[in-house]
Image (tube, coloured by chain):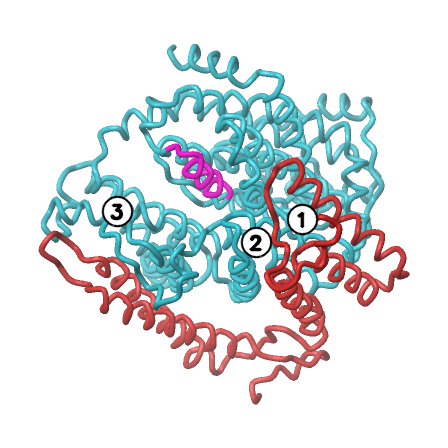
Chain colours: A cyan, B red
Amino acid sequence: MEEISALFNGFAVAMTPFNLLLMLVGVTLGVIIGVLPGLGGANGIAILLPLTFTMPPTSAIIMLSCIYWGALFGGAITSVLFNIPGEPWSVATTFDGYPMARNGKAGEALTAAFTSSFVGAFFAIVMITFLAPLVAKFALQFGPPEFFSVYLLTFCSFVGMNKGSPFKTISAMMLGFALATVGMDTVTGQLRLTFGHPELMRGFDFLIAVIGLFGIGEILLSMEEGLAFHGAAAKIRRQVVLETWAKLPKYWATSLRSCLIGCWMGITPGGATPASFMAYGVAKRVSKNGENFGKGEMEGIVAPETAAHAAGTSALLPMLSLGIPGSPTAAVLLGGLLIWGLQPGPLLFVEKPDFVWGLIASMYLGNLAGLFVVLTCVPLFASILRIPFSIIAPVIIVICAVGAYTVHNATFDVWLMLGFGVLGYVFKKLDYPMAPMVLALVLGDRAEDSFRQSMLISQGSLDVFFSNYLVAGISSVALLLLFWPLIGKFIGKKKAAAA
Amino acid sequence: MSEQANNSNQESVISVRMMDIITALLFMAVGLTVMVGSLKLGASWGSDGPEAGYFPFYISLIILLSSAVTLYQAAIVDKKKKTESFVDKESFKQVMAVLLPAVVFVLGVQLIGIYVSSVFYIAIFMVWLGKYPIWKAIAVSVGVSVALYLMFEFWFQVPLPHGSWFNPLEFVGVN
């Protein structure tokens, strides 16, 4: 078991006092970010990323990934206590979490949510530990056509899995690609699509886009709803925690099912949000207490929380092993790797084993630290939500502006951030998905490079994407997913005709 | 606008369908811009492989096609559907109450630096929308600015904008 010994080396890397401190800082910041409206995992990490440029990369990624774990935990607090999902993936948690809190069982609900989050994350991390090195080893044989077909698969699965209009998904995604091409062409060195504006030479940085789309856009949306927080008081006593833990093993089947759903949705870029809904739906259908779902059933918290965390965590698997992030937050972390001078992808396991295994070990420790922090400090975090929105909103906009500025030290980027904020608001209301756009913006250059290299190999023929079993297989699955909305419609019509 | 929703008791500013049409048209405009730009660069096969505009050209083509379908959906197919409101008047006012000051704030960041702009922005926001007493607003806003200064310029050594036109904090040694 070379993975086990590599993992122990990773623990040795991660367990320095400095890194442990960063873990605690990261998790605490993450929970705060998860609780605050307008700040989430993706833009929270994007804002803090420039502050880590001077740190050693391993410490930096440990802190940033811990912010992510914290944000995943934090979403549950607002869902249960305030009926406000702090993060999109905790919407399903409100269905049963808030009724439980209103019945005076806030402590139980929170304990169940945090513990299932931890279980989901733990399951996903174990999977990453053993699967990621295998995937990376396999991917070492990949050439440009294989890589492009994997990119194609990633983006086509957005089209296939998204419930909204496939054309809107494609439009949003292609906008991301188009924005990614602006600036210096990596192959020829020509300036592209800058139309003579020197400010555009830098191109559109995806960090700015993330801060604007998810931060400013979210603030505008919350403003429209005219947020007023009416929260249940919360305190978690040790007695309650122990009692809840004694009840949880009963739901092992739901847990396991949700773990599997979460991991699957996380690796394929479905993401945590659909995973949580799917797990909730399946649990409701399968459970004996299905009709009680929505009235405060603990199983209805276990299912979505487990799946959301499993998905959020396993989104890092393709990022680490292939260099293809499974979620916007994973994309931001990938952007961090590039900035720290690390080339994400299969070679990372060979060239920087300390970094990779340090990160994986820190996932175990970070989630443990997260569970501890949230269980002990819930009242503190809940009090953050009692700060009125008229203070929170301008402060968050100021923080977003600072974050956007520090990426390149350019005030032009702050304007861009505002623009992306308005775009995010409109996109959200019109059901244009933002995740594929952000991923396209991050991966645009790399996808284009692998496409051009493939074209060079084949002298311009698209046959290269079907030239051997591997690449042909991936490309076919990608195309199948791309046309899935059409195929699904066709099957549905046939069924309707038969009935 | 004729497609305004009459069934809701709040007045609609613009319908979802109209917004869909506008967004699709904007997408097409972006698509055309990218297409023109990539054709100028050369979107065909050069002597040494694909030219710089090769990839963006196809991207722009897909944008044009997919947004044309969205436009068709919104303009023709959804014509008979009941119109939903994209945003009603009250919400629109709320959104603008955040957005417009934010624009002024960003302008301020560029001209007089982030610290003074943040103080004004947060304080005015709190007094105007939150109905806070002025002393509370000033305490919070100055506190945030000082915290920003300490965190960025002091601990992380990351300079924030001090104002390209006029630096109001020059006399206290921020430059």
Q: Residue B96 at what x, y percent from top left?
A: 67, 71
Q: Which residue is mark 3?
A: A449
The kind of residue on which mark 1 rests is Pro
In the displayed orientation, state which residue is furthest to the bottom: B2
Q: Residues within 10 Å of mark 2 (few under 14, many from 20)?
A: many
Nearest to viewer (mark 1 / mark 3): 3
Which sits earlier in the primary sequence, circle 1 or circle 2? 1
Contact between marks 1 and 2 (CB within 8 A): the answer is no
Q: Which residue is mark 2?
A: A214
Instruction: For mark 2, name the chain.
Output: A
Nearest to viewer (mark 2 / mark 3): 3
The kind of residue on which mark 2 rests is Phe
Quadrant including the C terminus of chain A: bottom left
Q: Which residue is mark 1?
A: A85
Q: Residue A305 at what x, y percent from top left?
A: 61, 37
Q: CA distance from mark 1 to mark 2?
A: 14 Å
Seen in the image, is A20 located left or right of residue A257? right
Quadrant including the N terminus of chain A: top left
Q: Main secondary structure of the magenta part?
A: helix
Residue drawn where x is 39% and y is 24% of the image: A131
* Quarter holding residue B149: top right
* Front residue (pair B169, A370): B169
* Front residue (pair A99, A265): A265
Looking at the rendering, the stretch of residues picked out in magenta corresponds to A329-342
Residue drawn where x is 88% and y is 61% of the image: B134
